[in-house]
Image (cartoon, rainbow, N blue to C red):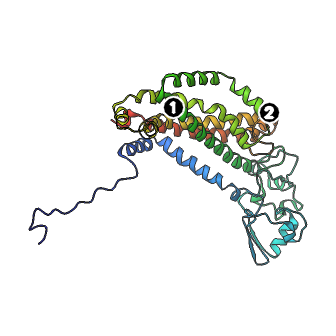
């Protein structure tokens, strides 16, 4: 007996598949894409950031891959001693003509587009550092530091300095690539850690209220009234410089900006009907805060994140400019700005750092504006 002959038998209907995004988030994503400037800024920023993560394969003083006497080597990933190529040093200088000739005579090398790392010193510059970008000089001028001048086989595009050198004869473009990566990674880690601490503190204040809110709010008012920049300078001068040391110092104050936003959202929503219903059903406070109140509070927090990220990068750059940031020799946009101030006869230093910072912060601001429009209730729920 088939289903058509017996109307009592119904064909089971599969439930619709649940998408990755809810209808509300789909509308938010559509609003984000509608802001063309912010949408394309996100893709451009992600492209630059992903490329900077592979900086060792773009700018390095070691070959990406090499073949020596039938053995395939990966110098960009593995430190090979110089004795492997007939030398005696613990670390191989692949830019040395002796080592390069030895490897080329018994194999081959594939170099990155830029044959300098952020700490590499160009010993073949045409005059004392800093030197201008190679495209501002003639072939004879840019190759004057090589033994054979313009006919030297090593005076190739990869060995030339595309954006010039700094006052220590280090490649500017390589330092910009590595400095961009450090700045963005530092800002991301600081923003995420600040968000975790600030959201937790604001959630506790707003949900429990009473004396808990009163005491924490007085502490935050006292803590935020301190002269942050002077305290950062004093602590940075006492402790040894380093990525995580600087991160911990700045984390002491950066979390405060999230507290007010999350606290206000929890104060507003803690007496809603669905929260009272959850309490009546015996749901514990942690579950109510995590599953019911936090998603609503994160709407305002997410719109705040890109601006906190840009502020973190600016603070790191400022400390590096003053000499209290990353350790000496580290690739830093702030240190490059300081070099541009010191070496006014080399305008490419200041201009390179200025344009790198301007592009980075502009992209983040455009992304932040698009995120703010995406989470605007007037556009999401219209």
Residue at coordinates 82% horizontally, 37% vertically from top-left? 343
> First in sequence: mark 2 or mark 1?
1
Quarter of the image with the C terminus is top left
At label 1, counting other C-alpha atoms closer than 10 Å, the crowd grade (few under 14, some 14-19, many 20 or more) is many
- The x and y percentages for residue 124 are 86, 55
In the rendered image, the residue lying farthest to the front is 282
Say whether residue 351 is visible.
no
User: Farthest residue in the left direction?
Assistant: 5
In this picture, is 218 found above or below 327?
above
Looking at the picture, how far across and down is residue 77, in whole percent? 72, 62
Q: Please say if 302 is above or below 87.
A: above
Q: Position of residue 364 (x, y in %)?
A: 57, 39
Tell me where residue 311 sits by quadrant.
Answer: top right
Q: Is 330 placed above or below 206 here?
A: below
Distance Cα–Cα, label 2 vs label 1: 34 Å
Report the quarter where the N terminus lies.
bottom left
Residue shown at 59% from the left, 29% from the top:
256
- The secondary structure type at the circle numbered 1 is helix
- Of residue 378 and residue 124, the one placed in the foreground of this image is 378
Using residue 234 as the reference point, say whether residue 297 is left or right of it.
left
Disc marking residue 107: none
Q: Which residue is mark 2?
A: 237
Name the foreground residue: 326 vs 288. Answer: 288
- From the image, tell me which residue sits under label 1: 204
Please tell me whether mark 2 sits on a helix, a strand or a loop: helix
Give the number of the mark in front: 2 or 1.
1
Seen as rendered, the residue at the extreme bottom is: 70
One can see residue 292 in this view: yes
Indicate left or right for 22 with 242 as reference.
Answer: left
- Which quarter of the figure has residue 314? top right
Quadrant hosting residue 274? top left
**Which residue: 84% across, 61% down?**
93
């Amino acid at each position: 007996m088939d289903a058509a002959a017996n109307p009592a038998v119904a064909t089971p209907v599969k439930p619709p598949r649940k998408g990755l995004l809810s209808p509300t988030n789909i509308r938010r994503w559509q609003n984000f894409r509608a802001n063309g400037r912010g949408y394309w800024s996100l893709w451009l920023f992600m492209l630059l950031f992903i490329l900077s993560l592979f900086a060792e394969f773009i700018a390095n003083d070691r070959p990406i891959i090499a073949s020596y006497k039938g053995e395939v080597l990966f110098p960009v990933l593995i430190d090979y001693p110089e004795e492997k190529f007939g030398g005696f040093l613990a670390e191989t200088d692949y830019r040395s003509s002796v080592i390069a000739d030895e490897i080329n005579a018994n194999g081959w090398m594939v170099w990155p587009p830029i044959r300098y790392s952020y700490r590499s010193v160009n010993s073949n510059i045409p005059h004392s550092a800093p030197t201008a970008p190679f495209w501002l000089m003639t072939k004879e001028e840019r190759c004057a530091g090589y033994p054979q001048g313009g006919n030297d086989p090593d005076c190739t595009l990869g060995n030339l300095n595309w954006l010039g050198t700094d006052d220590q004869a280090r490649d500017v473009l390589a330092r910009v690539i590595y400095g961009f990566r450090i700045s963005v990674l530092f800002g991301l880690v600081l923003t995420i850690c600040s968000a975790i601490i600030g959201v937790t503190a604001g959630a506790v204040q707003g949900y429990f209220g009473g004396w808990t809110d009163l005491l924490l709010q007085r502490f935050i008012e006292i803590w935020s009234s301190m002269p942050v920049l002077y305290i950062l300078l004093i602590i940075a001068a006492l402790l040894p410089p380093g990525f995580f040391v600087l991160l911990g110092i700045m984390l002491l104050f950066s979390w405060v900006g999230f507290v007010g936003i999350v606290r206000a959202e929890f104060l507003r929503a803690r007496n809603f009907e669905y929260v009272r219903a959850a309490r009546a059903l015996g749901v514990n406070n942690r579950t109510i805060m995590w599953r019911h109140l936090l998603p609503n509070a994160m709407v305002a927090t997410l719109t705040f994140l890109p601006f906190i990220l840009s502020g973190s990068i600016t603070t790191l750059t400022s400390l590096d400019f003053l000499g209290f940031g990353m350790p000496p020799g580290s690739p830093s946009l702030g240190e490059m700005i300081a070099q541009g101030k010191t070496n006014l006869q080399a305008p490419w230093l200041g201009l390179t750092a200025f344009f790198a910072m301007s592009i980075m912060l502009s992209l983040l601001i455009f992304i932040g504006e698009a995120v703010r429009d995406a989470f605007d209730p007037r556009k999401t729920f219209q």
